[in-house]
Image: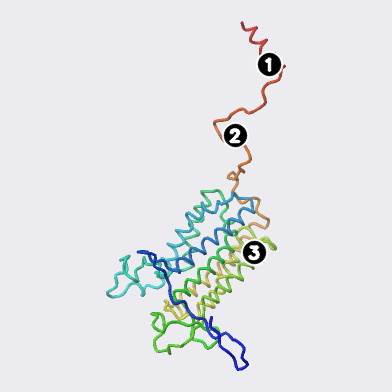
């Protein structure tokens, strides 16, 4: 952020500069800060979700087993959703969108272009498969993940800042965002010093506040059976409707609204439906984070009925038993 001196001589916020670089070169490898922000968000979500699941009685780090399926499918879903809602970006006369080595390719995810609602769809499929694999209740996992999802999204939005993308309308507010005038996303015809709404920052603040709200609601209101995840959908989508409405990046328009505004409206509806339906179906609390019959047994407990190589570790027989065995052996002789 840059500051200027007011007439009274005090420093006031003037504008928010964009980073001068969006990647670092490590030999032949180009590492994008956008990707690092996404990875940092995933790590933060895994750590927080593991903590929450473990407190519920789940096996420590079982979240890793679920994430092995959920994260790749979330990334694939996010990219597919983005491409389908921005077809003009990739499919036009003279384009070669299937060439993975061409800038602007549908495969060039490191350049940006993933959609959270696609990530939710793909990630939900992966999480459901992971929960079937581990025995964790799907809705238990979703509730444990909800605050971590918002935290990951807050961290990931800094990637848009490094890429100088997805900013809002021009503004003269003191916290306006500086965008390089030679940036491909800079609107033509505007003065080079035009400032824009920092929609990435608005979403960072909104999502961070949402993390606190969800943690409070889960603890104080005991929102279980997927209801906390429903609240996540409502919270995130309500904010997304606002931020998306002031963004100026190109997007497909339906009935006067951007594609992601419709997706956010749908997210609010689905979130409310989950809260209402699950409240009626499950008025009580969850008995266990595991489905019946798949409960985790701590490493300190010996479960001999679950193994075929049982070894008798009982005490050696006493004198009476030994004498009885000796008498029986003599009688047989």
What residue is disc 3 on? 215
In the displayed structure image, the side of residue 42 where residue 91 appears, left or right: left
What residue is disc 2 on? 305
Query: Which residue ends up furthest to the top in the rendered image?
Result: 333
Q: Is residue 228 or residue 255 the one in the foreground?
A: 228
| Residue 120 point in image, percent of width and height | 50, 63
Q: Is residue 255 or residue 292 the one in the foreground?
A: 292
| Residue 130 point in image, percent of width and height | 51, 52
What is the distance, in whole Å, between disc 1 and disc 2 at their CAs? 28 Å
- In the rendered image, which quarter contains the C terminus? top right
Number of numbered markers = 3
What is the distance, in whole Å, between disc 1 and disc 3 at their CAs? 62 Å
* Mark in front: 1 vs 3: 1
What residue is disc 1 on? 322
Q: Say which element carries label 3.
A: helix
Question: Which label's residue is closer to the chain start, 1 or 2?
Answer: 2
Question: Which label's residue is closer to the chain start, 3 or 2?
Answer: 3
Q: Say which element carries label 1.
A: helix
């Amino acid at each position: 952020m840059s500051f200027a001196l007011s007439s009274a001589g005090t420093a006031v916020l003037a504008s928010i500069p964009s980073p001068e670089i969006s990647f670092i070169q490590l030999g032949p490898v180009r590492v994008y800060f956008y990707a690092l922000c996404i990875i940092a968000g995933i790590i933060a979500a895994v750590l927080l979700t593991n903590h929450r699941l473990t407190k519920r009685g789940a096996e420590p780090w079982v979240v890793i087993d679920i994430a092995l399926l959920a994260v790749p499918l979330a990334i694939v879903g996010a990219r597919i959703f983005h491409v389908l809602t921005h077809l003009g970006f990739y499919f036009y006369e003279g384009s070669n969108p299937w060439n993975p080595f061409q800038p602007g390719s549908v495969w060039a995810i490191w350049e940006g272009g993933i959609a959270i609602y696609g990530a939710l769809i793909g990630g939900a499929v992966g999480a459901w498969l992971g929960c079937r694999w581990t025995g964790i209740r799907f809705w238990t996992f979703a509730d444990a993940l909800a605050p971590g999802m918002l935290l990951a999204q807050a961290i990931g939005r800094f990637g848009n800042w490094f890429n100088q993308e997805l900013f809002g309308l021009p503004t003269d507010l003191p916290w306006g965002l500086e965008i390089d005038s030679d940036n491909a996303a800079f609107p033509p015809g505007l003065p080079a010093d035009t400032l824009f709404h920092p929609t990435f920052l608005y979403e960072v603040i909104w999502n961070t506040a949402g993390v606190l709200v969800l943690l409070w609601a889960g603890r104080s209101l005991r929102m279980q059976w997927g209801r906390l995840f429903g609240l996540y959908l409502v919270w995130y989508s309500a904010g997304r409707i606002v931020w998306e409405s002031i963004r100026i990046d190109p997007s497909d328009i339906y009935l006067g609204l951007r594609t992601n505004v419709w997706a956010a409206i749908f997210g609010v509806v689905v979130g409310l439906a989950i809260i209402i339906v699950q409240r009626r179906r499950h008025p009580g609390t969850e008995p266990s984070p595991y489905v019946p019959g798949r409960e985790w047994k701590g490493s300190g407990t010996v479960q001999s009925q679950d193994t075929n190589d049982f070894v008798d570790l009982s005490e050696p027989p006493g004198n009476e038993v030994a004498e009885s065995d000796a008498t029986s052996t003599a009688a047989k002789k």
